[in-house]
Image: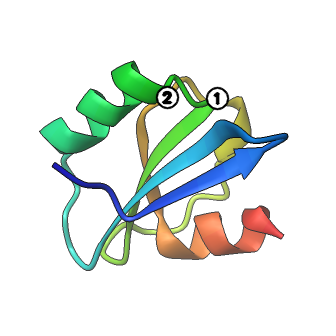
Amino acid sequence: REVDFLVTRDEKPFILVEAKKSEKNLSRDLYYFQELLKPEISVLVSGSLKSVGMPFQEASSPIPISAADFCSQIV
């Protein structure tokens, strides 16, 4: 099992990221690590989803989000 990235804050899991070129469905691995690590945010970042300007920090996790929306908000 694997996910692509884990961002930590104060040495605790903060953002769990699964990145896919065209996938829109959340993976079992993302759910597995969401339950195991309990990060504040879990996202599937997909290049095929359209940008809707959704703030992923306010959504209930895990959620699919466009790569454009994720990259514009992560900074």
- Say which label, 1 or 2, has the lower sequence index: 1
Residue 19, percent from left and from top: 36, 68
Report whether 22 appears left or right of 57.
Answer: left
Amino acid type at circle 1 is Glu
| Above or below, comparing residue 74 to residue 31 in the picture | below
Which of 24/6 is in front? 6
Q: How many marks?
A: 2
Q: Is residue 61 above or below residue 45?
A: above
For residue 2, side relative to residue 75 (left or right): left
Q: Nearer the viewer, mark 1 or mark 2?
A: 1
At x 30%, y 75%, the residue is 48
Q: Which mark is residue 49?
A: none
CB atoms of marks 1 and 2 within 8 Å: yes
Residue 9 percent location from the top left of the image? 79, 44
Name the outermost residue toward the front: 11
Residue at 37% x, 23% y: name it: 36
The quarter holding residue 75 reads bottom right
Query: Residue 56: which quarter of the image?
Result: top right
Q: Using the rendered view, name the quadrant where residue 71 is placed.
A: bottom right
Measure how far apart labels 1 and 2 are at the Cα level: 8 Å
- Residue at image coords 21%, 74%: 22
Tag of residue 40:
1
Identity, as a three-letter code, of the amino acid under mark 2: Ser
Where 54 sits versus 46, above or below? Answer: above
- State the residue position of label 2: 61
State the image coordinates of residue 68 (x, y, percent, origin top left).
Answer: 58, 76
Q: Secondary structure at mark 2?
A: loop
